[in-house]
Amino acid sequence: MNVLDSPIEYLKGVGPARGELLKKELQIFTQGDLLFHFPYRYIDRTQFHRIADLNEQSGYVQLRGVLRSLDTVGEGRKKRMTGRFRDASGMIELVWFTGLPWLQKHLVVGKEYVVFGRVTAFREQLNIPHPEMEAVQADQVQPSVVFDPVYASTEKLNTKGLDVKTRRRLIKNLLEKITAADLPENLPAEWLGRFRFPCRLQAVQSIHFPRNQQDLDAARNRLKFEELFFLQLRILQLKQHRHQASQGYVFERIGEYFNTFFHQYLPFELTGAQKRVVKEIRRDLGSGKQMNRLLQGDVGSGKTMVALLCMLMALDNGYQACMMAPTEILAQQHFQSIVGYLKDMQVNVALLTGTVKGKKRQVILEQLRDGTLQILVGTHALLEDPVVFHRLGLAITDEQHRFGVVQRARLWTKGHPLPPHVLVMTATPIPRTLAMTLYGDLDVSVIDELPPGRKPIQTIHRTESHRLRVFGFMKQEIAKGRQIYVVYPLIEESETLDLQNLQEGYEALSREFPPPQYHISVVHGRMKPADKEFEMQRFIKGQTQIMVATTVIEVGVNVPNASVMIIENTERFGLSQLHQLRGRVGRGAEQSYCILMTDHKLSQEARQRIQTMVQTNDGFAIAEADLKLRGPGDIEGTRQSGLLNLRLADLARDGRILQTAREMALRVLEQDPELALPQHETLRKQVEYDRNAGKPWARIS
Ligand code: ADP
Ligand code: MG
């Protein structure tokens, strides 16, 4: 048996008790698991901060000095331990809230330590909460190792004999006995030279115990590449198989409907991006394979027109098309736009939502079944069993994050004998790196251009002290005939408080903007759908000038006359949400504004979010910033995917490596889809190994 597959407890220095602990705390079952549990950082033995230079912005720092005192203060839940730590330049406080008994036993006043932690400020005083502490050995004055690895750990591991030093020793024991036979090269030999990669064994050795910075960088590069390459290879293989497997209707013709509309009724010139995307989709529809395409385009980029043109292609070939939106309001707006675009043509379009009932519903269902109804727009009401199509050729969903994968899959079953072509539209830009990974098996089209003549929205940050001026500005805009949104955050955990907030804001606005001159709509999630709808309609029809709302308006309302978006408690919104909200204005010809209201006091991160919003209108730039600020695990819709459990690579930072990995994977598969060529033998072996290990990567969209 390969050493790497042998149980962790058999490794020298582990044994049953520690083995149990490693399994429980870190899911390390085999010696290979331990080997691939990489350090998350290194202690650079040559780099220390001076305490005198620290400030609130220092972030994580490494210090070297002497622990001068250790005191327990407070009682009960407030109980904590503080230590004074001194170097030649000054003194800083260290503080701990948990694990006190162990610390008391192990930390020694008067001893020299290397301290690593994050500098924070409490009541104007700097301190470092829960620092990592490592005693300096007497013989360590001249460090022989430059980098010491530090591994992710837990309190249990630290206190039960698997602290960082023990872990280092275990890895050393393991590295001493493995050879290239245990850890064979899995990339083609030629690539090592081309990319200046160390071989696999060398890379794994170096990632644990790098000799110097270059050594570490090379090892990291290689291992990240390897991780991303095999991920892409699998995703692309999936896509290849899907393409081979899924037969689809062939839309051969561009006919009457498309041509008439395109040449006579198209209300504007398509943007370059719209044209390109329509071509991409057209190619899919004619290919004989079922289309499965994601269409990304920022708010206002004109996805609806693209959707309509595709639906007309379906009609030209004798098929029906449907379009599903996540809310009633959005479905209605799509319906109205489509009916508006097609007003001079003979196309039978209907709207089906939960509120369409009785005779009207009956007629829709009948016409759908006999094929006289050509385009059906609606909510998830489309998924219900009585909804039976005569010949559904194209199913479009909008704002896909709001639909579950299962719901989308149900649309597939609405087609007979073949599943319809599927186009998924989203206005939540996903950074390219994420899209390649998350939707790597879908084809992706991007509308990366806004229709001409749009004035960029001006985004401004304001605090409570500007409130009166903001009111003044609102009056100015209303006097010009514009309408205004005022949006409050609402989250489940603090719903009551949030609604109270909104209520107070509404009352303040009512005093400032009284009838008969002004009228205000209020919409929030606790209202009955009918009331919500009523208030919404008043605003859409221009009967109210101000709409006070929670995030219900985030999805897709289109009121071109609304030109000001005021967001309250902006610090509580995430970046992508802010961008979506801002996208509600700037839809007409007027200059639009987005005013971000916050408290004076803001966290560093909130400040960065607001700065990003003020600086750019580009949804993709914002998505990238969001990814950097929050990490991929938090991006909406990606949480459950499991695909992002990358060991080493970071999708936010390693876009270049990912790009290369994807290109190489594409090239390999193009040349050798089954990995049968001798130069791809190493790749094939790794893929087989992963497959046998049952890696759960097969679920994507
Ligand atoms: P999205 O759904 O991508 O947010 P929409 O399809 O609602 O965007 O389009 C936003 C607005 O831009 C609509 O009023 C639409 O009529 C208009 N529009 C779309 N494409 C163009 C274009 N090529 N030129 C001018 N206006 C366009
Ligand atoms: Mg839209």
Image (cartoon, helix red, strand yellow):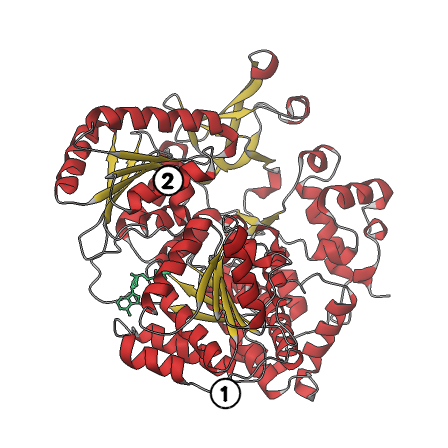
> Disc 1 marks which amino acid?
Glu
Q: Relative to 68, say whether 390 is above or below.
A: below
Q: Relative to 143, say whether 341 is above or below.
A: below
- In the image: residue 473, left or right of residue 121: left
Q: Quadrant of residue 685?
A: bottom right
Q: Earlier in the sequence, mark 1 or mark 2?
A: 1
- In x, y percent, where is residue 308? 40, 70
**Residue pictured at 64% horizontal, 58% vertical:** 385
- In x, y percent, where is residue 73? 55, 13
Q: Relative to 514, say whether 235 is above or below.
A: below
In depth, the one of 505 and 198 nearer the eye is 505
Q: Quadrant of residue 120?
A: top left
User: Mark 2: few, some, or many residues within 10 Å (few <14, many ≥20)?
Assistant: some
For disc 2, the marked residue is 534
**Residue pictured at 73% horizontal, 53% vertical:** 34
> Disc 2 marks which amino acid?
Phe
- In the image: residue 100, left or right of residue 30: left
